Image (tube, rainbow, N blue to C red):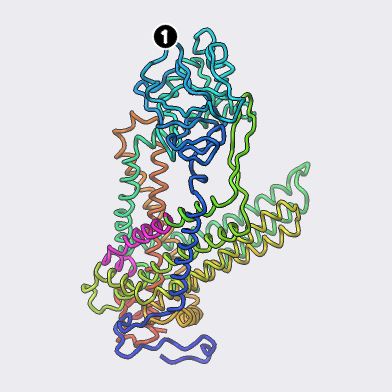
Amino acid sequence: MGKGANDEDLGDPLQAPPDFDGPIRSRRMTDVLCTILLWCMWISMTGLGIYGMQNGDYRLIIYPLDYDGNVCGTDLGDMDMTEFPYLYYVNDYSGGVCVKECPSLADLADPYTLVTYDGLYQVEGSANADVAANISIADYSSSGNNNTLSCTENLCYPNGNPESSYSSFGVNQGKGYAYYAVDTYEVFWRCVFNDKGIDQLNEVVAPNGSNFTEDVISSFTSQSEYVKQGYGIWENLFNDLWLSRYYILGIGFGAPMVIGFIYSFLLRIPCVLRIMVWFSIFATVGIVFAGAWYAGMTASQWKDLDPPIYTEDEIKVATYASYALYAVGGLLTLLFLFMRKRIQLAMGCVKEASKAITKMPAIIFFPVLQALGFCCFMVAWTVFSANIASMGEFSTKSFEAGNVAVSVRSFDFSDFVKKCGWYMLFCFFWSGQFIVALGEIVFSMAVAKWYFARDKGSVGSGTVCSAITTSMWYHSGTAAFGSLIIAIIKMIRSFLAYLQKKAEEWDSSIAKAIVCCFQCCFYCLEKCMRFMNKNAYIQTAIFGTSFCTSAKEAFFLILRNAARVGAITYVSGGVVFVGKVFITTTTTGGAYFVMEGLRQELHSMIGPLFFIAFIAWFIAGMFMSVFDMAIATILQCFVADEEMFSSDEMYAEGTLKSWVDDHGSK
């Protein structure tokens, strides 16, 4: 293909390598230096993590702290709590005592047994003797805290009456140093009350409907009734989620995959995609014109008010807004008319992308491998980070809350530990972005192999496996290069966020404005670099070139096809969004009917359905990200195909081939 005079500044059209028949087979490792740097980062992170494990103790960070400042399950406080790793909450201020195991009570609750700061207290003749065997509390008699109060009949159980006990000095409606024995379950070494046990307990100690959490909340907010309702909703929600956990996990993770493939198949039906795209275009233009009409009508109504309520300036703003929106609507109309051929090409790319994904179903599951890889990294990173953070100088601070003492942990970090924290954040950014980048190269290579195959029947899930091995062996360096750029930008944005916090402390309006401007600039830069990286990875997948070469070729390719790229971005964005909504709503609607048999056991189906919708939206996003990358790859493959070959030699098929036949190659 020749190059016109107007294309002199847009780079040379792509040239087909000798004997080109798809993504090149004879490849070399690209950007090896970045691969070495990535491994050096991981090795140094590991070394730093080992140093943290030797000089710190993650238990200081994540293990619970009792009321006396001891870390449960350790000997790191004034008392040895090694045999008592769990925390049983005694009051609503998070004060509690270390216990050997979280109590599991057959009767769910015993209102005549109290867990106190000073051990177990049971009402003689009324308490369940078996409960004492299920609750083993650390001995606080050797505590250095001389203010620890013990329960007596007068302090905790006056007249042996449960209702009087609830408002006694010791229990104090959940704000004292004692609380009742309730069935619990363990969450991160914390004993969480069984809500059914709490309900059963309240029937005895607070039959009028009062409970300690509501009473505490009432003392902190004038909107107590709403907060009380919110707390009750939260209790019911947690119980509903636990009862329906298998439905949530099964439907939430499984159904979106199946529905995603159905959506891909629907897009191959000509009328479906055409209606979807043109409806979104007309809706966009219609919304702009509707906004213009509404602004004009509002301005007219304001002007006719007698007596006037709005100022002349406010009326002028509404009027000018109406004119501006009419202008925008007119420009959008002209733009869509001008780009109608490009929009048809974009729809062709979408159809071909859906065919590619349907032909290679295994490509959808590669994000699962990415997620597993990221989880493995996060396990190591979290352990290392927790140990490094624990190298700070640990101390506890006690404060009085009502008639009880409560302790909180505090850390004072040295400059070395702070620098280690920043470095660990950089490792997190680079590793996470590397996993994403490698996935984009894999997706691009698999779709490119499908596009440039004369015999599409020879392409299948095996092509995805080949793309994975080729990308990881030859182009890990390119993924590392691109992800390093994003990681550096994110580090700068993180530092700017730190400065924003400092500016708040300084109460400097000028500093806030300057830092905010920089934050916006780097946000835009990150978005631009992500777009360029994605297109560079596609070039690498097709031609096996290094990151810089691929980025250069991708940049000029985008310039030469700006209108097409704009159209495909608009169309693919709409298709991806509609796909996410379709997958999420269909999954949630199906879950409603599947869970019909569980309705009687739940307080409400809203909570479980919300979480299913949340998971489905996440899985749909993962599915549609593959779809989005496939669309972008198809476009670049088509442009490369168009620039490298004549119309008779092109690899384009189906809708794309029809587009070339109707409009001619560029």
Residue at point 57%, 23% (across, down):
176
Residue 160 lies within the magenta run: no
In this rendering, the answer to whether 579 lies above or below 590 is below
In this rendering, the answer to whether 663 lies above or below 289 is below
Task: Name the side, left or right, on which 456 lies relative to 347.
Answer: left
The residue at the far front in this view is 142
Tell me the kind of residue under disc 1: Gly
Residue at point 40%, 55% (across, down):
580
Q: Secondary structure at mark 1?
A: loop
Q: Quadrant of residue 103?
A: top left
Please state, as top left, top right, bottom left or bottom right, where the C terminus lies in the image.
bottom left
| Camera sees residue 340 | no
Q: x and y percent of residue 486 in the render?
A: 52, 68
In this rendering, the answer to whether 294 lies above or below 78 is below
Residue at point 55%, 26% (across, down):
214
Residue 371 lies within the magenta run: yes
- Which residue is nearer to you in this view: 153 or 208? 153
Instruction: Give the main secondary structure, helix, strand or loop, of the magenta stretch.
Output: helix
| Camera sees residue 130 | yes
Look at mark 1 in the image and give the residue it sits on: 125
Q: Quadrant of residue 197?
A: top left
Q: x and y percent of residue 614 in the render?
A: 42, 47
The image shows a total of numbered marks equal to 1
Q: x and y percent of residue 49 in the render?
A: 48, 58
- Which residue is nearer to you in this view: 338 or 104? 104
The residue stretch that appears in magenta: 352-379
